[in-house]
Image: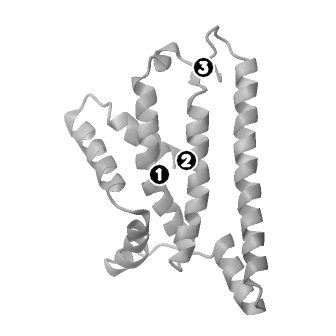
């Protein structure tokens, strides 16, 4: 997935007009359709034209397509920034990338709501209905997501602090990862 994001962002900066145009059109197209529509296109339309993928591969494809356009815009901004020319990793990207990753995890609930993938939310709903304990099941699902998202966010903050502490330049905007 990361390669798709980087390729889309790099394509928008290509010196080849065709590559630049295709990359820009891809981002425009994907940003112009809702995630739910993309879910139905992959799960319902692709099999009709003879492309059948395993369920988890379909879910991964959907999230890769959807988030590659979003992340390419973030990376595109980085490619245009003066920080890029310094050769380091801009700390300003970490919160943005963390936010997108957290959004991707949350968006798995949309895929499960459509009925194609059974994630935490789907399982909580299913168990809650079977046991007549919807409230308890939804509270457990909420707790699972809170723990997951909070862990990722806190880890990203710790990484940012660590990188700032070990920065190689004097302005603090980027660090060398090599």
Q: Residue at x 35, y 53 (%)?
A: 31
Q: Residue at x 76, y 34 (%)?
A: 158
Kindly report the distance in space between the C-alpha atoms of the residues bearing marks 2 and 3. 20 Å
Q: Is residue 37 found left or right of 116 in the rendered image?
A: left
User: Which one is nearer the viewer's eye here, 135 or 127?
Assistant: 135
Residue sitting at the far front: 135
Disc 1 marks which residue? Answer: 67
Q: Where does residue 72 sit, x and y in percent of width and height? A: 42, 41
Mark 3 crowdedness (10 Å alpha carbons): few <14, some 14-19, many ≥20: many
User: Which type of secondary structure does the marked residue at label 1 adopt?
Assistant: helix
On-image quarter of the C terminus: top right
Quadrant in the rendering for residue 48: bottom left
Instruction: Pick whichever of labels 2 and 1 is earlier in the sequence.
Output: 1
Instruction: Pick whichever of labels 2 and 3 is earlier in the sequence.
Output: 2
Residue sitting at the far left: 17
User: Which one is nearer the viewer's eye here, 64 or 119?
Assistant: 119
Q: Where does residue 17 sit, x and y in percent of width and height? A: 20, 34
Q: Is residue 85 found left or right of 124 in the rendered image?
A: left
User: Which type of secondary structure does the marked residue at label 3 adopt?
Assistant: strand
- Is label 2 in contact with label 1 (beta carbons under 8 Å)? yes
Q: Where does residue 126 sit, x and y in percent of width and height? A: 68, 85
Disc 2 marks which residue? Answer: 100
Disc 3 marks which residue? Answer: 174
Instruction: Pick whichever of labels 3 and 1 is earlier in the sequence.
Output: 1
User: Which type of secondary structure does the marked residue at label 2 adopt?
Assistant: helix
Quadrant in the rendering for residue 16: top left
């Amino acid at each position: 997935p990361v390669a798709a994001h980087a390729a889309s962002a790099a394509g928008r900066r290509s010196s080849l007009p065709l590559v630049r145009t295709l990359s820009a059109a891809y981002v425009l197209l994907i940003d112009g359709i809702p995630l739910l529509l993309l879910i139905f296109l992959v799960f319902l339309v692709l099999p009709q034209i003879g492309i059948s993928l395993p369920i988890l591969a379909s879910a991964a494809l959907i999230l890769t397509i959807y988030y590659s356009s979003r992340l390419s815009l973030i990376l595109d901004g980085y490619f245009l920034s003066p920080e890029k020319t310094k050769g380091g990793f801009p700390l300003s990207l970490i919160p943005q990338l963390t936010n997108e990753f957290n959004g991707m995890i949350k968006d798995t609930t949309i895929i499960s709501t459509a009925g194609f993938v059974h994630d935490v939310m789907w399982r909580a709903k299913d168990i809650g209905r079977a046991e007549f304990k919807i409230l308890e099941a939804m509270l457990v699902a909420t707790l699972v997501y809170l723990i997951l998202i909070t862990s990722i966010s806190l880890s990203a903050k710790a990484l940012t602090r660590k990188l700032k502490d070990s920065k190689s330049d004097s302005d603090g905007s980027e660090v060398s990862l090599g």
